[in-house]
Image (cartoon, grey):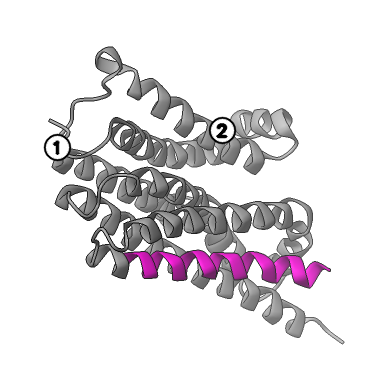
Amino acid sequence: MNEIILMAHVLFGVACLLVAVWLLVDVLHASEANLARIRRLSWAAAGCMWIAFLIAGYWYVTKYPADKAVILKGPWPFAHTFFMETKEHLVILLLLLASYLPIAAANDLAASREARRLVLCLTAAMAGLALLVEGHGAIIAAGVKLALLAQPH
Amino acid sequence: MNRNLGKYTVSFGLSLALCSVLNALLVVAKEKSPAVAAAMQRLTGHHWITHSAGVVLLFVLFGCLFSLLNGGRGPQLGPNRLLGFVAGGVLTGVFLILGFYLVVD
């Protein structure tokens, strides 16, 4: 069950990233024809991010302290002291961006260049930040793995 | 003034910019002050739950409050200035967090 919880937050995080990139492309070609899809996708991105955030929060509060202890005794303590510490606060920013996205996408993107530019910047920021925290997650996982490998058998 | 942007887009955009910076400042406050960290821990049982719930609540609160400005018409801000605030706030938030843990902490 622990593994499912751990992987579920990655899955929904990646889904949010993919939807943000899809939105970026769709908004570049915004017209009356794809306006409804853009709005649905913006809600999907927000939904994926909220699910990822809640699952990750549960993991972080209840399961991560054991991993943290392992990481800090291993060869990569910075996997916690820098990467986890920054990740746990950058995802709050990502959550705010994702929550704001449907509000910005509610404007008439087909008619308004300004609204399109705003949504393009939001989706680009979300994709960049999501990639950054996914990378952080990989380094945290490597920190645990290296610490366990370094333990005497 | 808000050419083509709804009042909630402007209000919550400003709230996003503000809360991005507040999020980073809260990181600095709780890392530098054990009293702040302990108070946040006490409030919900975990400092991170208090931190994230607090920032999300502030985002909603400021967004709603900003939308009431100017007799309910919301902040009178052009799209370029709004984008400047949003980009500036988010980038400041990201670099404050990364810089704090990289350099100061």
Q: Amino acid at mark 2?
A: Gly
Q: Residue at x 73, y 30 (%)?
A: B42
As drawn, A79 above or below B30: below
> Which subunit holds the residue at mark 2?
B
Magenta stretch: give its range.
A1-24
* Category of crowding for the residue at label 1, using alpha-carbon neighbours closer than 10 angstroms: few (below 14), some (14–19), many (at least 20): few
* Category of crowding for the residue at label 2, using alpha-carbon neighbours closer than 10 angstroms: few (below 14), some (14–19), many (at least 20): some
Asked where in the image residue A71 lies, by quadrant, the reply is: bottom right
Mark 2 vs mark 1: tell me if same chain: yes
**Circle 2 or circle 1, nearest the eye:** 1
Tell me the element at label 1.
loop
Q: Is residue A10 highlighted in magenta? A: yes
Q: Residue furthest top?
A: B71
Q: Is residue B33 visible?
A: yes
> Which subunit holds the residue at mark 1?
B
Which disc is residue B54 wearing? 2
Distance between the alpha carbons at the discs numbered 2 and 1 = 32 Å
Which disc is residue A4 wearing? none
Q: Residue at x 47, y 25 (%)?
A: B61
Q: Amino acid at mark 1?
A: Arg
Q: Is residue B16 highlighted in magenta? A: no
Give x and y (percent) for residue B60.
47, 31
